[in-house]
Image: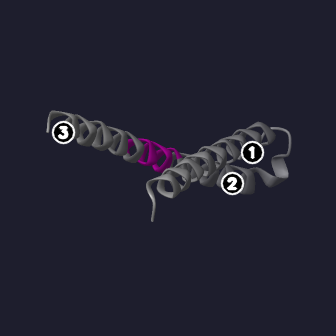
């Protein structure tokens, strides 16, 4: 696997994780907002809000991990380039 395709895969993973985080957070916020307006679905909406918030947390952690992975790649390339110049 080439460095360029690895970088593209990582960028795609970061983009997808961030998008899904926003969707989960929005779903949770909408469910919480609807609780007082639709009392008959209170339990279902609260469960949906909790599930959305939990998913948002997990997706945010996934996004942050992929950011760390990207920074490690950048640091590795910078260190490798520095070593090549000193030789």
* Spatial separation of the CA atoms under disc 1 and disc 3: 54 Å
Residue 41 appears left or right of 15: right
Residue at image point 51% right, 44% down: 60
The count of marks equals: 3
As displayed, is residue 34 above or below residue 62? Answer: above
Q: Nearer the viewer, residue 75 or 17?
A: 75
Residue at image point 21% right, 40% down: 84
Q: Nearer the viewer, residue 68 or 40?
A: 68
* Mark toward the viewer: 1 or 3: 3
Q: Quadrant of residue 83?
A: top left
Q: Is residue 23 magenta?
A: no
* Spatial separation of the CA atoms under disc 2 and disc 1: 6 Å
Instruction: Give percent across and percent down for residue 30.
Output: 76, 41
* Badge number at residue 31: 1
Tell me which segment is drawn in magenta: 60-68
Residue at image point 66% right, 55% down: 47
Residue at image point 45% right, 60% down: 2
The residue tagged with tag 3: helix, strand or loop?
helix
- Crowding at dot 1, Cα within 10 Å, few <14 / some 14-19 / many 20+, comes out as many
């Amino acid at each position: 696997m080439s460095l360029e395709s690895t970088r593209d895969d990582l960028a795609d993973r970061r983009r997808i994780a961030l998008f899904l985080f926003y969707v989960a957070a929005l779903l949770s916020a909408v469910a919480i907002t609807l609780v007082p307006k639709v009392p008959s679905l209170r339990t279902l909406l609260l469960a949906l809000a909790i599930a959305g918030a939990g998913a948002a947390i997990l997706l945010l952690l996934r996004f942050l991990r992929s950011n760390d992975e990207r920074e490690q790649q950048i640091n590795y390339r910078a260190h490798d380039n520095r070593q090549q110049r000193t030789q």
